[in-house]
């Protein structure tokens, strides 16, 4: 069981009003930005269910945009995140939907620049969040470990090549989760690590034949 | 050091009158791999944020978007700054207005310390800061009281997730009140048994508290509830300091709390599908806000 710290109870330091609808929204935005890996110039958010219904009063929209801008959960600029997004030339769009097959607090984030990516997340309560899909792949990424995300061609030896790099750097793997769309098509793997991979290692993995996308995603601040 | 599972274990560890904050600081130091000084610095930063949220809240009386809250801390502070023939002392007025100030600041997207949650963030800061000011309590003791309060909250959280959606408001303002009651006894330098009794008495008297926020917002009944439960913590601490003891041990109260949370209808657990949220006025406010939100997009 996860250790519950005194600082989970007295804390976190955050902007209000809601740990699930505000701090959670910021964290989903932060993870989406880290997964996209660069500054987007256009972001489309689709809010679902409770996020859509009560998001305005909770500043869910401002929180999500603040996260995309890289603001932490206690950054008072979150209140004015739309203004900061405009200053940085990032176009923001929101739409609302009801879909009760989805989590009550969920969002799809479509990020555009030279290429586009769709990241879906849920706010689980008490500021805990989960990214549950990236470009249609099911994942479970919670920002509680330094994480390596890869999308690659489904062929023999791919995992071995990558885990070998990680072993050579003497970095321990905490958990590993694989998915694929169809045999021989695209596959995805999410690896949670005890240490963030050094940049040169990420670059090595990136240039491995058959790898389409690699992201090294640092854990969220407590 | 292995984790402390419940209050019985905590009481065993403190048998030679070791203070609870010392025990929790040792535990955190082992688990988070941080020195005592680092942990102290973290808590001082949190205390400073708490003080800042009180200040900011008091000088910023603005109604929220919904119009349901935002000026109550100012009204109470005015009464206690200027009122004559006040039946209660300055400490009482400070606790009420400080709790309101923090939770109002939370509603307007100001910076707060979740304690234990954002919806209950006014209770612990209000009592710690107000007592410290009125009794000239040094900062070190305030920090210690926050470690004790946090430790108490942690032991409860290990049994019941502290979220209105899981166990109702007893798990938010209820726990905040138990933490605050414990903090007061710690600030007054009294015994470990009194700390536990204060927490137990406060918690016991919040059992069954539902989470039925109007329009799903952290405003009605949350804002005023923070003020009420800060004073509730004072009552619990006063009882404990007078030697009143809980009949039901705190570990068993937590079992009851968990059971009550489980039996509570989902309509009354942060879904806004029952209670105050579905009164005629509650529904009207929710409808108006939803319209506003969709119109703007």
Image: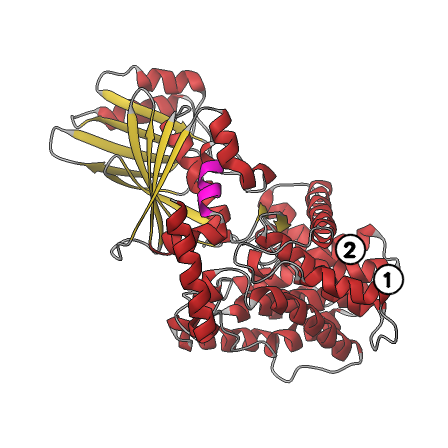
Rendered location of residue B190, percent (x, y): 81, 69
Q: Which mark is residue B142?
A: 2
Q: Which mark is residue A213?
A: none
Q: State the predominant SS element of the stretch in magenta.
A: helix
Badge 2 marks a residue whose secondary structure is: helix
Q: Quadrant of residue A109?
A: top left
Q: Is residue B187 rendered to the left or right of residue A63? A: right
Q: Nearer the viewer, mark 1 or mark 2?
A: 1
Q: Quadrant of residue A137?
A: top left
Picture layout, residue A5 above or below residue A117: below
Judging from the image, mark 2 belongs to the subunit labelled B
Number of labels in the image equals 2
Badge 1 marks a residue whose secondary structure is: helix
Residue found at x 82% / y 66%: B80
Asked whether residue A42 appears in the rendered view, the answer is yes
Q: Earlier in the sequence, mark 1 or mark 2?
A: 1
Residue found at x 32% / y 54%: A103
Check residue A61 for magenta coloring.
Answer: yes
**In front of the other: B79 or A72:** B79
The color scheme shown is secondary structure
Judging from the image, mark 1 belongs to the subunit labelled B
Check residue A214 for magenta coloring.
Answer: no
Picture layout, residue A40 above or below residue A98: above
Rendered location of residue A48, percent (x, y): 33, 51
Picture layout, residue B40 above or below residue B191: above
Cα gap from disc 1 to disc 2, whole angstroms:
13 Å
Residue underneath mark 1: B134
Rendered location of residue B36, percent (x, y): 71, 44
Q: Is residue B154 rendered to the left or right of residue B39? A: left
Picture layout, residue B45 above or below residue B247: above
**Chain part drawn in magenta:** A60-66
């Amino acid at each position: 069981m996860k250790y519950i710290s005194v600082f989970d109870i007295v804390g976190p330091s955050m902007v209000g009003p809601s740990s699930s609808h505000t701090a959670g929204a910021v964290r989903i935005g932060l993870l989406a930005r880290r997964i996209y890996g660069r500054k987007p110039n256009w972001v489309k958010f689709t809010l679902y269910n409770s996020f859509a219904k009560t998001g305005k009063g909770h500043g869910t929209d401002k929180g999500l945009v603040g996260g995309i801008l890289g603001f932490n959960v206690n950054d008072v600029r979150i209140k004015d995140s739309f203004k900061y997004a405009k200053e940085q030339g990032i176009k923001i769009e929101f739409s609302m939907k009801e879909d009760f097959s989805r989590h009550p607090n969920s969002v799809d984030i479509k990020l555009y620049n030279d290429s586009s990516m769709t990241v879906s997340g849920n706010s689980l309560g008490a500021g805990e969040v989960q990214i549950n899909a990236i470009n249609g792949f099911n994942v479970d990424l919670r920002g509680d470990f330094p994480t390596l995300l890869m999308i690659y061609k489904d062929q023999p030896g791919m995992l071995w090549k990558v885990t070998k790099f990680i072993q050579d750097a003497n970095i321990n793997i905490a958990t590993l989760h694989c998915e694929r769309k169809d045999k021989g098509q695209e596959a995805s793997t999410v690896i949670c690590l005890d240490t963030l991979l050094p940049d040169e290692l990420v670059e090595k993995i990136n240039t491995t034949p058959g790898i389409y996308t690699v992201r090294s995603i640092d854990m969220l601040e407590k | 050091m292995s984790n402390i599972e419940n209050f019985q274990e905590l009481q065993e560890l403190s048998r030679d009158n070791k203070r609870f904050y010392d025990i929790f600081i040792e535990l955190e130091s082992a688990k988070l791999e941080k020195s005592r000084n680092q942990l102290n610095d973290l808590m001082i930063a949190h205390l400073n944020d708490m003080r800042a949220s009180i200040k900011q809240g008091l000088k910023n009386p603005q109604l929220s978007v919904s119009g349901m809250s935002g000026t109550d801390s100012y009204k109470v502070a005015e009464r206690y700054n200027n009122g004559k023939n006040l039946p209660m002392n300055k400490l009482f007025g400070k606790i009420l207005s400080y709790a309101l100030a923090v939770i109002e600041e939370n509603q307007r997207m100001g910076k707060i310390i979740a304690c234990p949650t954002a919806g209950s963030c006014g209770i612990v800061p209000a009592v710690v800061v107000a007592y410290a000011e009125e009794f000239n309590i040094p900062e070190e003791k305030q920090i210690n009281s926050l470690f004790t309060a946090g430790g108490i909250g942690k032991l409860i959280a290990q049994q019941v997730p502290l979220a209105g959606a899981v166990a109702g408001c007893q798990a938010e303002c209820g726990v905040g009140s138990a933490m605050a009651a414990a903090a007061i006894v710690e600030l007054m330098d009294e015994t470990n048994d009194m700390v536990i009794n204060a927490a137990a008495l406060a918690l016991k008297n919040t059992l069954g508290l539902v989470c039925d926020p109007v329009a799903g917002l952290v405003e009605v009944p949350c804002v005023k509830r923070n003020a009420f439960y800060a004073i509730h913590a004072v009552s619990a601490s006063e009882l404990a300091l007078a030697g009143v003891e809980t009949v039901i041990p705190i570990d068993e109260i937590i079992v009851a709390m968990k059971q009550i949370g489980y039996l509570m209808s989902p309509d009354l657990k942060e879904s806004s599908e029952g209670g105050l949220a579905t009164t005629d006025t509650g529904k009207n406010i929710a409808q108006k806000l939803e319209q506003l939100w969709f119109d703007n997009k």
